[in-house]
Each structure stands twice: as C-alpha cells, then as structure tokens.
Image (cartoon, rainbow, N blue to C red):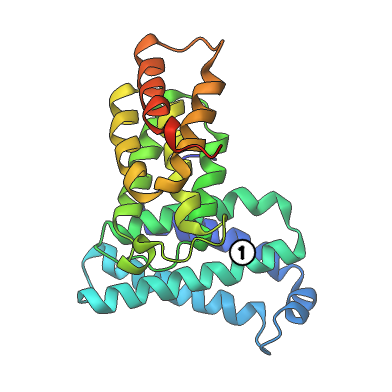
Amino acid sequence: MNKLIFEIDAISDQALQVMQAIMARETEAKEIMEDGSGPLELASALSDFFEIAATIESGQAMLDSDDLTEFGAYGLDLLDRMAFLVRKLEIMDHRDHISRIFASLAVWLVRREVIIDNLEGTADGFGMLVNGLVEPQDLSEMCQVMEEVIAATSDELQMDQDQSNPWRPWRVINLNEGIAATRSLDPVLMEKTFEKLSRRLPHDMPGFFADGKRQMIGQNVPDEVQAVMNRYADKWSNSLPH
C-alpha cells in the first residue's frame, strides 16, 4: 500500500473506493459539508476531473501550462475536501488510501509540468508513506519522487516566508525527504538531499542533523553513511541554540 501509482485510472479507482466509503455515510457527510453540497456532488466532480485527466494522459486533450496548473489545483482541492470528510467521519481504514492518492496525483501532475501551489495533503501523504517504508531501495525511490514534487512547487511556497507554523507543508515535505534519504542508507543520495535541505530549511538543519547523528549511534549503519551524517551534523553544530 506504500507504493505510488502513476496511471490516472488507478488513482481514480483508489479515489472511488474512498468516496464509496463516504457515500455509505451520506447523511453524516452532508451535515459536515456546511456549504449545502453533499458527497454525491463531490463524487461527481472527482469523476469529471479524472475523466478529463485520462484524456490528457492519453493525448486526446491538450491544455496549456496555465490551464494545466489551474486544473491541477482544482484536483488537489477536491482531494482536500475528500480527505476532510474522511477525517471528520473517522474512516480510519482509508487514511492510507488518501495518502497514496495525494502523493500519486501530485507526481502525475508535476510530470505534466504543473506548478504545485497546494501541498497540504501531498506533504502529509508523503510523510505517511515514508513512515510505512522499510526497504532502503523503496526509501531511495520515494525520496527521488518527492524531490520531483518539491522542485515543481510555486515560487511562493519555496520562498517559505511565514515560518510561524512548524507543520507548514513546505517544511513537512522537505524534512520527510531528508528522513527518506537518511533511511535509504545511500550516502550519495543523502549528500544531494542534505545540500538541498540546507538551502530550503536552514533554521531546521542544526536540530535535524544533530538528531540524525544521535539516532545513528549504536546502529548498524555503513561507515560511509555515518560519515555523511557526522559531517553535516558537525557543520551545523555551531548554529545550535545554546
């Protein structure tokens, strides 16, 4: 369940499963949706979105860059609404599906040159997926896919001007990319990822690397992996608050 899916029909099928679970509790869902709409309208909007996406994937429809970005923002907004209902209805057995859908659709969009301006569900989704991975190769692949999404975010998100919220999506997705790189035990990937993290979240780096170094103590990790972590921890140690 922690693997991403890259075909729009498969992503659509996952979303349909979640919407069916929501529809099974339609009365409760209507009460939650205070705008007067109901889950049936959301299901219909999602169906239309995925139908159009399928024509884009197959080459039957073409959208220019601005229209594609607007289309992608609309799709992610629909997923936000679906995820909100899942949380409110406490449909816990579909939380993993939501994570997979968000991350998969984000990758599908950025591979079509969409600029991502809404990372809310995507950042949380990737975080849950990373937490569920064990194999270094899977973590390495996930890290690289996350970088595709991060690199395709809007300039406004990347500027990270308001740092008052520690749970802001920009911070969450970048830190989870760093965690995935560390757990991949790939020193080359770690080095590349840490350099990007150092530019994107400089204020978080002293704590991130100090924690990483501390967690590796006594662990059976390759020397070259330990060396990368130690080097970055030492580099940023002078920036730790006293």
85 left or right, relative to 169: right
Q: Quadrant of residue 143?
A: top left
Viewer-side residue, 9 vs 201:
201
Viewer-side residue, 151 vs 104:
151
Above or below, comparing residue 128 to residue 183 in the picture: below
Q: Where does label 1 land, which residue?
A: 83
Q: Quadrant of residue 80?
A: bottom right
Viewer-side residue, 72 vs 49:
72
190 left or right, relative to 61: right
Q: How many marks?
A: 1
Q: Residue at position x 41%, y 58% from top?
A: 105
Name the residue at the front extreme. 242
Question: In the image, residue 129 lies at what x, y percent?
Answer: 53, 42
Question: In the image, residue 172 lies at what x, y percent?
Answer: 50, 50
Of helix, strand and loop, which one carries label 1? helix
How packed is label 1: few (under 14 Cα within 10 Å), some, or many (20 or more)?
many
Question: Which amino acid type is shown beneath numbered disc 1?
Answer: Ala
Q: Residue at position x 64%, y 52% from top?
A: 95
Whether residue 52 is visible here, answered yes or no, is yes
Question: In the image, residue 28 lies at what x, y percent?
Answer: 79, 74
Above or below, comparing residue 208 to residue 153 in the picture: above
